[in-house]
Amino acid sequence: MAIGLGHSIREIGAWLGISGYLRFPENQFVRYLAIDSRTLNHPEETMFFALKDKRDGHDFIPAAYAAGLRFFVVSESYKLVQDNFPDAYFLVVKDTLIALQLIARQHRQAFKLPVIGITGSNGKTLVKEWLYQLLQGEEQVRRSPKSFNSQIGVALSVWEIQAGDTLGIFEAGISKRKEMEALRDMIQPSIGVLTHMGDAHQSGFSSMEEKLKEKLKLFDGVETFIYSPAFIPNHFKETLPGQHKFTWLLDEKGEADLKVQQLSVNEGMAELMMTYKAEVVIIKLPFQDLASLENLAICLATLLVLKFKLPEAVQKLKFLHPVSMRMTLVKGFNDCSIIDDTYSSDLDSLKIAIDFLKQQKQHPKHSLILSEVLESGLAAEVLYSQIANLIKQNEIDRFIGVGPIISAHAQLFPKSAVFFESTEALLEQLDALHFAKESILIKGARRFGLERITALLSAKAHDTVLEINLRALNDNLQAYRRLLQPGVKLMAMVKAFSYGSGSYEIANLLSFQKVDYLTVAYADEGVQLRQSGIKLPIMVMSPEPNAFQLMWDYKLEPEIYSLDLLAVYLQFLKLNGISDKDRKLVPIHLKLDTGMHRLGFEAHHISALKALLKDNPALQVKSIFTHLVAADEAVHDDFTHLQIERYQKMYEDIITVLDDKPLRHVLNTAGIARFPKAQFDMVRLGIGLYGLGNDFKGAEELQSVLEWKTTISQIKQLEAGETVGYGRSGKITRPTLLATVKVGYADGYSRKFGNGQGKMRIQGCEVPTLGSICMDMCMLDITALAERAITVKPGDEVVIFDSSDTIRQLAAQLDTIPYEIVCNISQRVKRVYYYE
Ligand SMILES: *Cc1c(COP(=O)(O)O)cnc(C)c1O
């Protein structure tokens, strides 16, 4: 990834303090950096950093070498066998991440350009993208791709600065103390922008103030610091960074250089008054939620700092458009899967999107509809030959190019590729292309309006959707992985439709991230995963005898929890001609009951179990496990330890009759965080993946994965004395504005949420239910919206929950646990997956 100016390998050796760097070849240049073995376009000019991040990057070295890479930065602990890589150069360092950051810093120092550094708890990526939209014509802007704001992301972003760039815009994100210093040293901002600071608790920090203090470190040494006093406690004000300060305030009393006031809102347009140094401009803009208005104010403040005049800067705001970094995955017609990424078009985001396309195993066929890639800074010939290479390397089965320039380079692409001069031309021919049973990535610059293609190919969106953030799910997976001892395997629990989140969509991601095992509750869930191309080993927790054949055919591995079940299974095997001669042919898992008293062998079953195992060498015990009853509750820790002890005893006893040692596993989500000593050979991660772990003591906080949304069907104005809904339980005592929304108890929205118990949100404003919840819909009292001059109409979005916290609140209200809330969301609620 990343194109740089190029530095010689000698120079990099010197920076990293590699002894003997002078023996490196003099005229070898490094222009690209890689951290995994995917999509390497110029292996001979790429340097590979073996990072210990999500996975140990050292594992990718053989593949990267085979792809032609010759420069590797590896850690001291790596057992290098140079004979395997005869002509490669290995730069051995203590810490490969620090090495990567060091060369990013050196690269950054080679350029004198002004750089805007952005941090805060919300809105970083949005502000970065908006500033890019605003300044693009005036400057040659280099910015972080997507939300690359981490310790690695910033290094890769900064490396992209090239000769000719006149402005850099980079975002920095941290999750714990002592992370910002490294980001600051790489970004070296001259202008600092602090975005919204939320008061959400973050486990990496001891307090809000500490979080703010750490974030402010990005701005040490900036010329100008742009912030809102609303986010800064008074006693901080003496010690703020920046030779100059520029302050802004939204709708608040107080002093600030720039004040933005919302005069009115109508039909989605806000009328705003901007005041700067006795100058006033009033303008209507198509944004009205608080977050967008804050981000608008921040962008305007930045333009003013960059010496634009107020009227000119305000005019520019008119051209802002909403930013979506979202790549969504939805079901399409003719059994297709549609990946919609029609908001951005640059090489990096294309690579990310192609990776995502290739993860989709549910259809063997992968197709790509791509518009011209704009603003790459490359000559068309170079650009499209790179893209054609990507298509070939990734074995895209069907390629469709849209636009005159890409069409003019058709000869670079595989012969089967099809081209259209315009989106309109493609639209006309869409039926003739006969899309069926394939995964289709639709990717392109906004200007081409490829979302029209998405709309035609995807099944009509329902009005009530459960959105699943795959990036957050992936981050949660990695957060738990970091808690594992080296070598401990991970089993991901995808039972009950992945806790309500989906089936193959989640399994594809888990399989791409190389978890070791998947677990489902019933055989049919496993069959569905196999039919969608999932190759991982799959354990079935409730194997029913009438599904044994199916499980056998689809290579699903049963959990055996009783002598009876084992006897029936052995009988099934015998009937199918499996005999004692077929040694270790039949994988099974043994569940031990150490205190749950649900399923599992108890201590007094063990001798009979041993006898059966001994007599049936065709069985291969893959794992022996137990389940903790209260891993999340400190009051029961003694019992947890007792369970672990009982488990170990039973395990040791069973293996006396086995030739090898089956995998041991005990811990669920809460256990992983709370009983690190009991990780044994594998752990079973469930609810934590979905962002709902209880007691997570890891470094980062878990991210919310799920958002449940519906829409307004009708709005009514009612007078006092009327009632709403069945049984007249919703009494109207004052003039009331009412909205009927498309979610009811058949969707999983409990009747207990009726009569004001449940709250939803419309444009950030909380509104209660009114009357009882019906089967397919319910009513909300939205009078509060009218009081705040917010207008809504049928079709507008209503949020049922949008974070793990709101899911926990709903669970608490019903006196249940988050698991039940999410598993109850009916299958008729359409799942939309996105990646950002
Ligand atoms: C569901 C389940 C898990 C996962 O539990 P979480 O609390 O969701 O992590 C682990 N083991 C077994 C046997 C389970 O049934």
Image (tube, rainbow, N blue to C red):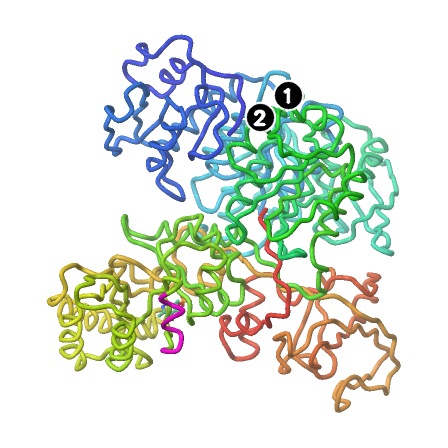
* Along the viewing direction, whichever of 573 and 343 lies nearer the viewer: 573
* Along the viewing direction, whichever of 478 and 377 lies nearer the viewer: 377
Ligand 1 visible in quadrant: bottom left
- Which segment did they paint magenta? 545-552
Q: Identify the residue at horizontal 70%, vertical 58% (top origin).
A: 459
Q: What element carries label 1?
A: loop
* Along the viewing direction, whichever of 94 and 453 lies nearer the viewer: 453
Task: Please state if 623 lies on the left or on the right of 500 as rendered.
Answer: left
Q: Identify the residue at horizontal 71%, vertical 33% (top origin).
A: 419
Q: What element carries label 2?
A: helix
Indicate which disc residue 165 carries: none
Q: Please state which amino acid type lies under the numbered disc 2.
A: Gln
Where is residue 156 shown, x and y percent of the image?
Answer: 50, 30
Where is residue 150 shown, x and y percent of the image?
Answer: 49, 39
Predominant SS along the magenta part: helix
Q: Is residue 265 magenta?
A: no
Q: Is residue 593 above or below residue 20?
A: below
Where is residue 709 shown, x and y percent of the image?
Answer: 67, 64
Label 2 environment density (alpha carbons within 10 Å; few <14, some 14–19, many ≥20) = some
Q: Identify the residue at horizontal 54%, vertical 63% (top origin).
A: 501
* Mark 1 lies within 8 Å of ligand 1 (Cβ measured): no
Circles 1 and 2, Cβ within 8 Å, touching? The answer is yes
Residue 116 appears anywhere in the view: no
Residue beneath label 1, please? 378
Label 1 environment density (alpha carbons within 10 Å; few <14, some 14–19, many ≥20) = few
Q: Please state which amino acid type lies under the numbered disc 1.
A: Leu
Residue beneath label 2, please? 386
Is tag 1's residue or tag 2's residue first in the polypeptide sequence?
1
Residue 700 appears anywhere in the view: yes
Task: Please state if 767 lies on the left or on the right of 549 as rendered.
Answer: right
